[in-house]
Amino acid sequence: MSDIIGVSAFFHDSSVALIRNGELTAFIKEEWLTRIKGTSTFPVYGLEYLKKHYDVTVESVEKVSFYEKPLRGWTEMMNHSLQKPFFRWRQTSTLLKSFWDGPLFFRHHLDRVLPVQKQQVCYCPHHLSHALTALAYADQTRDWTAIVVDGVGDGITASIFYVRNGVVNCLWRTKFPHSIGLFYSTITDYLGFSVNDGEYKVMGMSAYGDPIHQDVMGEMIQFNEGILALNLSWFEFDHNPKQSFSKKFVDVFGPPASNRDLKYEKNKAGFKRLADVASSAQFVTEEILKDLVKYAISLTGCSNILFSGGVGQNCLAMAKLAQLKEVIEFIVPPSPGDSGSALGAAIFANMVSNRPPIKLPSIYPGASPASPLAENLNKELFRLETSPNTMMKKSAYLIKSGEIIATLFDRPETGPRALGNRSLICDAGQADVVAKLNTLIKQRESFRPLAPLMRKSTAGKYFYLNKKAEKCYKWMGLTAIAKPSAEKDIPSVLHIDGTARLQVVDGKVGKICDLLEAVEKLDINVLVNTSFNVAGDPIVFDIIDAYVNMQRMGIRWLLSDEGLMEIIDA
Amino acid sequence: MIRTLIKLKTELIRGKNRNFLWMFLHEFSYAEFSSAIEMLQAAKLNYDIKISKNLIDHALDEYNHTKLMRSIISKYTEDNPDIFRNVRFCPNHTIKKGYVDPSKFLFQKYGIERFFIFVGINEQNASKIFTKLRNRCTDTLRKIDSKSGDQQSYAYNVTLASDVIGKIIRDEENHENFSLIYASRNVKKWKFLFFLLWERILNNIRHFCASNSTVNKWVAASIYLIVITLIIPFRFAFSIEPPRMNNLVSKENSDLML
């Protein structure tokens, strides 16, 4: 018995993580297999995949760890709802419904797929799962201040932990409904994007506005002397599952976004009004997070910061936090959100079992897609252009000639960002190709930038890198400010505020390095790297998904472990 | 899945509210998207390459239908924030709304034979609903466009919408033919007829449930209100001790849900 499984489910993206022989052997997001983005149901397919392809059995499993304390989470939320039972009756009804099919019946769901003994199941406090996820990417021999900020988990919305010699103590926490994550989600809802999905669009949009509402927003959310407080008169999320903002919010900021307002055009008043709201929210969020980090350091006396939780995906805010003079080192994990915390839950079980810390996880810890049918079907769907020996050279020429290449190498990335194994790649120097990729192929909003991919030496030439958070550039954990040379050579991958969420390739990690090496011979030093999926879909997992997505996007070339392939009937 | 569609369809045919057109297309886009997901899963689970390829093509059609419907919705709701908020497309709502059950996809649940009969019957229904609603949809679009005063755009949009719906109907008919012909050739005749009848009966039951969906909603809301009222005197039980702060990674209490 050596397998430890971490499970995240029922709220955001479900996932499973497998720790075997002291390392993260597999990580699977349920959405990769169901093909429905944001699948939050119990990860039946993820666990079945582990059984089928990793020989996980009831006998091989030592512990299964769930990423929250389900009864605590449910009870805390019920307690809040029942304080004003009729005012919040819709919220209470939702909670009553979730009693039967939610996390309280975790064991029941697990028994159907992996019927382990009761004593083999453990429950990790939700924010601790997040903190341990971040700890996996840090030097565990040192002391760390771990800060977790998200919407809500176990009734808690933000926590500060002190990690020392494998002992984790919580020094501060705050409860629902006072939540930085839910404040940002409210803005997301107001701006017409889906909550728990469109937050990154608000971040992208914020660069187009000015924080003219910072004073008003400063009234909505405050952090003073360790107390985080939301003025609930601006919000409805605690009693209305269908709308997060209140009438007062609309009275002050105007009607919520319409589809037309969201279309970016220079000097368009409708868009600018919304961008100002986004910018103000981003500004206020950053200021509160800065205060929180300073407060955390004052509590622990330790300036090495781990930051996790859904708010950790705000790479713009993360860059600002890493710049604080109080911070010595800053790490935000590749997947700071709920799906990544399956890893944290697994680490919790690993620690509880008195095992040594796990090895530093790869940035490509996903599971290898394997299907005998896919291998045969491959020939029906693709024509092999060149073998693996010459595929990089040929791909480099295609990129140089303005083609967009899709990649499908071995294992997918953990986090929401494609890091080369499931990416769409093109030359960052060709503005027309980059624009085509962004708006026509990916069909993203035009105000959202694409991310550049480059070597460390090139990154130093084009960007001001923050040495305190150097590691996080490997997985696009934070943005960097561009130097004037970048504005001249690669303007198409810079955001309007002169930043980029770059991926720095350091050393020989993944096949994307080989591609980078091949294009460098043709004088291309920066590539565009965006996730291989149609907007609204999960990142592709196997060759069939690759084919379907390429057909939908009109992409011809696929670079895979088997060679460079051209789609049939493109 | 069918429940909401039928309710919306009835409202739309009665012509009570123009906004029902968007809600109808919105719901139908979920249905088309979930159909694409089911086809894709079936393609992956099936062991016959030719059938898999057909299922992949079917999935691509359904994805395309979703996109076409979304483009019509997006175009006609772009100035109205309230409708826009109500017709935002969230893929995981296909699960919440009951269009897809990811614990077991239809191909796993039914097996290949019944799967194709199910698909055939449902495609047949979809094409019938769309044929009935085609005129109604284009009429509504025509009214909206004629108010805008831009005659060129008006004519173009009405033709476009009509073409889009026409294409969807043609595709649905092709899928229906492929599925039912495959099933009739590969399933024993009695079994084929039995499943055909069975699926039709199930569809009628779904129609019946759908026509009572508003009643169901009110009944459920009343039950919840009664339960909440009954819980109120015991609400102190939900006020639990705060969680521990020190040495959080320990075996003690790790097996407790609280």
Image (cartoon, rainbow, N blue to C red):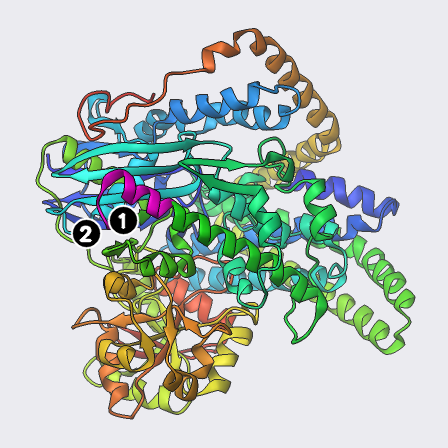
- Can the viewer see residue A108 in this picture? yes
Query: Eyeballing the image, is A168 above or below A493?
Result: above
**Which quadrant is home to the C terminus of chain B?**
top left
Determine which residue is flagged by label 2: A138
Is label 1 in contact with label 2 (beta carbons under 8 Å)? yes
Q: Residue at x 28, y 23 (%)?
A: B244
- Can the viewer see residue B48 in this picture? no
Q: Is residue A297 left or right of residue A272?
A: left
The quarter of the picture where residue B246 lies is top left
| Magenta span main SS | helix
Query: Eyeballing the image, is A491 above or below A422?
Result: below
Amino acid bearing label 2: Ala
Residue extent of the magenta highlight: A292-305
Amino acid bearing label 1: Leu
Whole-percent x, y for residue A568 in the image: 43, 78
Determine which residue is flagged by label 1: A306
Q: Is residue A392 magenta?
A: no
Callout 2 secondary element:
loop
Chain of the residue under label 2: A
Q: Which one is nearer the viewer's eye here, B221 or B106?
A: B221
Q: Is residue A500 left or right of residue A421?
A: right
Q: Is residue A295 left or right of residue A192?
A: left
Q: Which one is nearer the viewer's eye here, B202 or A472?
A: A472
Q: Residue at x 53, y 67 (%)?
A: A207
Whole-percent x, y for residue B125 in the image: 69, 48
